[in-house]
Structures are given as structure tokens and as C-alpha cells.
Amino acid sequence: MLSSFGSKKIRRNENSNNLTLARVIIVTLFFLLVVLPPCLSYFSSILSFTPDTPLLVSAQSTPIWPTFQHDPQRSSLSPYTGPSTNSTDWVFGPTAGIIDSPVIGSDGTVYVVDSNHTLYAINPDGALEWEQKFTENLFSPVIGPSGTIYVPGTRYLYAFNPDGTPAWTAPYDISTSRGAEIAVSPTGIIFEIDSGGTLHAINPLNSVASSIWTLNLACIPSSLALSESGDLYCGTGENGTTASLYSINPNGQIMWSFPTKSPVTSPPAIDESGNIYAISSGGEIFAISSGGDLLWTVSTVHAEQTPPIIGSDGTIYVGGTTASGSTVESLSNTKSINWSDFCFAESNSSLCIPFDTVTSMAIDSDSNVYVGTNSSGLFALNSQGGLEWSYSFGLDEGADSPLAIGSNGTIYVGTSCLSCNGTRGYVYAVGRPSGYSPFSVSESGLPAGASWSFSVDGANYTTSASTLEFSLPSGNFDWIAPPSEIYQRSGVRYASSVSNGSVDVPSVSSLNFKYSIQYELNFASSPILGGNINQSSGWYRSGSVVSTDAFAANAYQFASWQTTSPYLVISNSRSPSTNIVVNGPGTVFAAFSAYVTLNAGPGGSLVYNDPPLTGTVNSRQSASFYASSISIMLLTAIPAPGYNFEGWVSVNGSGFDTASPNLAIQVRNPMSFTAQFVPILSASSTSSTHTSTTSRTITTVTSTRVTVSIPNKGVLPLQNWGLIFVAGISVVLLILLGVAVVLSLRYTKKKPAA
């Protein structure tokens, strides 16, 4: 009884243990399959922040001019002093027309896009650092908190690292209208308005940008601004919608809207108190509190307006066009007009010349206002509206892009040509850093519009202008002037009479490169193994006389000099030593003849034809000579009566039909050909002479050749016996293996239990 009870208890314990084990297994599987993956994903996302993670942003990485109008508040206020003179620091280009704002990284690198879908990174000295080409229209770049460059396009939003390597690409489009901008918050969140007017908040902190929220307000893409508190502002009123200015909080919720009568097409400016200053297309200026209340309004007669900008003291500056010309106005933050300029006067003249159309403005830390115009140049005005200096761009150029102020007393602006529909432009750096001297490099001799380049102390410059100006510190600098390629015509270039040297600054302030045309002359051997030429391919000035010699290799002989270029004159084409007059590009070939041997076997002859080499090789004879590698040699085998042509035997010859009596051969290397013949046999001339016990038959013919026929009957070939031997060994090994398995099983069954 007890034993039975004990056994049941043991079974219950075993069952309980099994149930516990099953439960442990189920819980473990649940943890591994359900709980663990999202945890790993979460911690992985925390550890995989990109460089725009706010925790990684340092003061040293703060960009100098990170976005259109300097900051997301669109103040156009620089913390640095602008240029005090109208000197040229450098000019970069030509590019296509530039109408979007340059931005400046923390190290002084300037990033700008042109109308030919190219993003340029320009070093602080004006040399190209890198460039990226695209297949769609681009808009003003924006530099993120840690240096990532964001470039909006009409189809995609692109992100690049400061070294030019792509970070990611996301399918967020932006309107094709001019002035469309994006904004980036201090924490790295990107805001943009797409082609349909929808406002997007985008998280770029992972390897692929992702959407945070969207809000469809029919916003105008050029009207986006962002306050320091994170509130967004955009204008509506196009495409039949009500003209209003909207305020949206960082979570994508509408806070308020303010009616503006006519659309606000340019971004409002936001001061330190959060007050918003917006200009409608009807010429009315609105001052609105952060809560959406009207502070004041001013009506102007301006038909076109630049976005408002705000000085460090809260003064508002606007520019626009009236019926009588363009003006720049200064207003206090209580709407009173401080001053209004509609013309400028040079310091040595009493004449006041009207402004052309004002395209952009920026203000420095000293309240100096810089004004870009469509065709009359760039102007610097002091805080009282007085002219400090003016700057003229190249002929037929206008300041078409917004301005950007650097940290070294330099202002940057892009231009577009006025008569070529913006297909050409430049980037100007105006203002010279302290301790630098003006320096200019010019060229003479190049065709109009030809691109040329040079480098000074390792910095590379490229331009199609005849003169390029920039600044250099004091010191000694090495320079290089490489040849200028003319790509419209292969083999033509222009080269400076002096291609390198050094210069002392400031004792020397300019360089002039005198270019002259050069042509590419190439040399080649035909065939390649036929010989050598003692003159290398190279570039020669027009009218140059080049001496050269040809040397034949073993089993070759020099034949002639040849060229297909009408610009090259060979003085003596039959002499291995000759002169070549260079009047244009081309290639000269040294043609070599290869040694050829022809043989005719018994029973026929061989005829060859390669003018001027022609002749016949009779039966059992041969002929040798040098054959041109350019022409085609014809060979014909003619059998004698009673003989048939059997075939060709060749040494070094290939790619021809050996059974055809007619050959066309291009002799590219030394070779020999032998024509073989066989007699025509009658039916009675072949008989069986002997039959062996193994059924082998040997047939003898009265000819110069003996044919042996061995039928495969009665005797297996050697390779078949080898296969039979290998098969037999394999069968034996399989039988032995089977016996071993059977014996092993019997031994296991008979073994007593322990």
C-alpha cells in the first residue's frame, strides 16, 4: 500500500517537475521572441544617434551663417562685423546662375547651389573643396546643429556630411517656386513646405529621415519662419485660399491665424521678444505679438518687397520698389520711420544715383546694412542710412542671391548674368580679412570664355574670366598654371609659357599667364611588336618640328611613316629618320614589314599577290620576303595534274580556313605558310595486304603519305580496362564494409547486460 502510494507520489512529482520545466521553456521562449527584440531595437536607436543629436552639439560646431537670412527667425543679423571696405577677397566661378542663399559652416566653408543642379563647397580662400551634381532643381542649403548640410530639391531632401559624402536621401519634395526654404530647429528637427502647401516636421536623427507630423494649410513655401520657442509661421493666400499668417506649435497644432488681406509671400522676421514682422504682397507691414495680436501696421507704396530684417537694437529694415524707384527704409519697433534711402551718393560726388531693384539685405553686429541690387551692385549703409561704400560686379551681372556675412569681415553673394537668362553666375567674397593683401591673376591668349585654372600654395582656382582677384596673407607662395584643355576639339589645349614658380606677397601683387595653343602628337608602331620609336607622344606648339627615328625589331623591317591627320607633315615617309611639322593634332604610325616564308609541297605551286610583291613558288620550293602589315596578301594554292589540294600548314598564322586554296592574310607578325597536296587515287590502287587474327587492317597507298586504319573491334582500349579495374575494387570495398556492419550488430546482441 505504502509502496503504491510512494510510487504515485513519485509520479506526481515527476509530472510536476515536467510541468514546471514546460512552463520555464514557454516563458523563456516568450521573452526571447516577444520581449527582447523591441528592447534591443529601443536601446539600439538610443545608441545610434546621428551627428545632429543635440547632446553632441558643441559651441565650436556652431555654423557662422547656417541658413537663409542667418537664422530660422529670418533676422539676417550676423554676430560679426561685416566688411569695412569694398575690396575683393575672391571670386569663384563661373557657375550657372545663383539665386539661392549661400550658407557658411563653422570652419568658414561656403555652401551654395546654382541653377544647373550643382552643390558647391568652397574653401574660405575661394578654392573649390568639393561639388555634388543632381538631376533636379535645388534650393538654399541649411546647415544642421553639428554641420550636416541639408539640400532641398523639387523631389528629394538630401543630407551630406561636411566632407561631401552623402548621409541620406528622403522623398520630401519642395515647391518649385523661387525662394522656397526649409528651417531647422536647434534640436535638429527639419521643417519644410512641400509643393502642395503641406507643412512637414521631419526627424533626421536616424540614418533615414522619418516624418513626425504633417499639416495641410496650403502654406506658401517661401514664407516659412521658426521662433526661438519652436513655433512655426507661414503665410497663405495663394491659389484662392484666404490670405493669413498662421502660427503652429512644435507639435503641429494651429495656435492662431491673422488675416493679412493679401498673401505673405516672404518669410516674416521674429525678434528676441517673439514679435513677428510680416510684409504682405500689397505693401503692408504687420507687427504681431507671439499670441497673434496686432501691435501695429504700416502701409507702404512698395510694389515688391524684400523680407524684413532686424538689427541688434530691434530696428526693422525693409527694401522694395516704388513707381519712382527702389528704397531702403529703417523703422523702429514702434512703426516710426527712422530714415528712407532711394539713392546713393559717392563720397566725392554730390549726385545721388537711384538704387536698382533691391534683391536682398543683411545687417552686421555694428548695425551696418548691406544691400544687394539687381544690376547696380552691392552697397554698405551705416545705421543712419549713409553710404559707406559701393561695389560693382562684373559686366552684365546682378546680385541675385540673398547675402551671407562671414566671421572674417567678408560678405558673400551669388550673381547671375542679366542677358543670358541666368545660365552663368559667380560667387563673390567682398571685404578683405585683416593682414591680407589684394592679389590678382590674369591671362592672355585664351579664346573668349575658355576655362583656365591655377593654384597658389595648394589652393585651386578655376575661372573663365580673364582676371581673378582674391586676397593673400604676407609670405612666399608656390604657384602652378596647368594647361587649359579645349574640350570642343580633341587634342587641342592652351599652355602658359611659364607653368610654375613662386611669388612674394605683398611685394608682388599680380601674375599674368601668357597662353599659346598646343597640339597633341601621338606616335605608334604598326604592328605594335614591329619596332620602337625614339620619340614619345606629347604636346607641341603650332609650327614645331619634331625629329624622330624608328627601329625595327627582329624579323621585321621598317616600311614607312604614315598618318591620317591633315595637320601633320612628314618630311620623308620612307626613311626611318624623319621630321614632322606639327600644325594640329594627330597620330604618326611607324609601319613595319614582317618576315614571311612561303612553301609549296610536292604536287603543286603557290601564287602570292601583295603589290608590289607578287610571284609564284613552285613545287618543293620556298620564297621569303618582308610583307607590309597594313596591306592584305592573297595566297592561292594550285595543284599539279593528278594532285588535289590538301590544306595549309602555318607557323604563327591563325584565324583562316586551312582547307580553302585561297587565303587573304594581313601579316601582323613573322609567319610561314605551306601548301600541301595529295595525289588523286583510283579505286584499284587501294587493297588489303594483310589481315591479322585481331581483325586489324593496314591499307597501303602508293603516295607520299601512309594512312593507317585500326578498327576498334575485338580488343578493348587501355582506358576501358582501367575503368573496369576501378569498378571492381569499389565493389569489393562495399562488400567488406557490409560484412563489418553485420558482425558488429551480432556482437552487440550477444553481449550480456551489465
Image (cartoon, grey):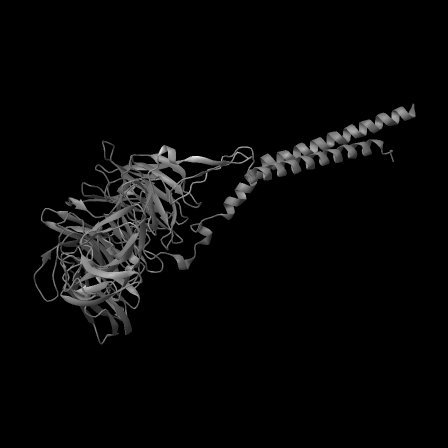
Residue 1 vs residue 315, the one in the foreground: 1
Image height of 68 relative to 390, above or below: above
Q: Residue furthest top?
A: 1
Q: Position of residue 706 (x, y in %)?
A: 42, 43
Image height of 667 relative to 475, above or below: above
Q: Quadrant of the N terminus?
A: top right
Residue 226 seen anywhere in this rendered image of the structure: no
Q: Residue at x 88, y 27 (%)?
A: 6
Q: Position of residue 688 (x, y in %)?
A: 45, 35
Dividing the picture into quadrants, the one containing residue 644 is top left
Q: Quadrant of the C terminus?
A: top right
Q: So how many labels did they put on this image?
A: 0
Horizontal placement of 293 versus 563: left or right? Answer: right
Dividing the picture into quadrants, the one containing residue 64 is bottom left
Residue 211 seen anywhere in this rendered image of the structure: yes
Q: Residue furthest right?
A: 1
Q: Position of residue 416 (x, y in %)?
A: 18, 52
Q: Residue at x 37, y 32 (%)?
A: 683
Residue 222 vs residue 645, the one in the foreground: 645
Q: Position of residue 241 (x, y in %)?
A: 25, 32
Residue 343 vs residue 549, the one in the foreground: 549
Q: Residue furthest left?
A: 351
Image height of 224 relative to 62, above or below: above
Residue 184 vs residue 595, the one in the foreground: 595
